[in-house]
Image (cartoon, helix red, strand yellow):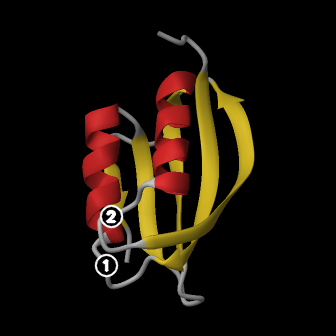
Amino acid sequence: MSDVLKSVDYEVFGRVQGVCFRLYAEEKARKTGVVGWVRNSRQGTVTGQVQGPEDKVNEMKAWLSNVGSPSSHIERTDFSNEREISKVDFTAFTTRY
């Protein structure tokens, strides 16, 4: 178990809107034990932020890059602004509109 808390922003490209991607992302985040948010962008991508222990954030990054929802097709996922944090900014993982 990692003591280091991480925060990372992400953007998922591909067929990720209209395929329950946000719902599955919320479910995966809850099961993984990370907090943050997810939302559809006007560009047809899914964006958000993940925070939590480094190993859990890495697990979520792998899911965002390779798994997604059953009907989605992920072309690529860009991660940015990855940094260590002293505490998480969120109490849960939520969908933003």
Q: Quadrant of residue 82?
A: top right
Mark 2 residue element: loop
**Residue 20: percent from the left, percent from the top?**
28, 73
Residue 27 as seen in the image, left or right of residue 86: left
Q: Quadrant of residue 54?
A: top right
Q: Which residue is mark 2?
A: 69
Mark 1 residue element: loop
Residue 81 as seen in the image, left or right of residue 38: right
**Residue 45: percent from the left, percent from the top?**
55, 78
> Mark 2: few, some, or many residues within 10 Å (few <14, many ≥20)?
some
Task: Measure the alpha-carbon separation of dots 2 and 1.
Answer: 7 Å
Residue at image position (53%, 81%) is 41
Q: Which residue is mark 1?
A: 19
Q: Decide: marks 2, 1 in contact (CB < 8 A)?
A: yes
Residue at image position (42%, 55%) is 67
> Mark 1: few, some, or many residues within 10 Å (few <14, many ≥20)?
some
Q: Is residue 48 above or below residue 6?
A: below
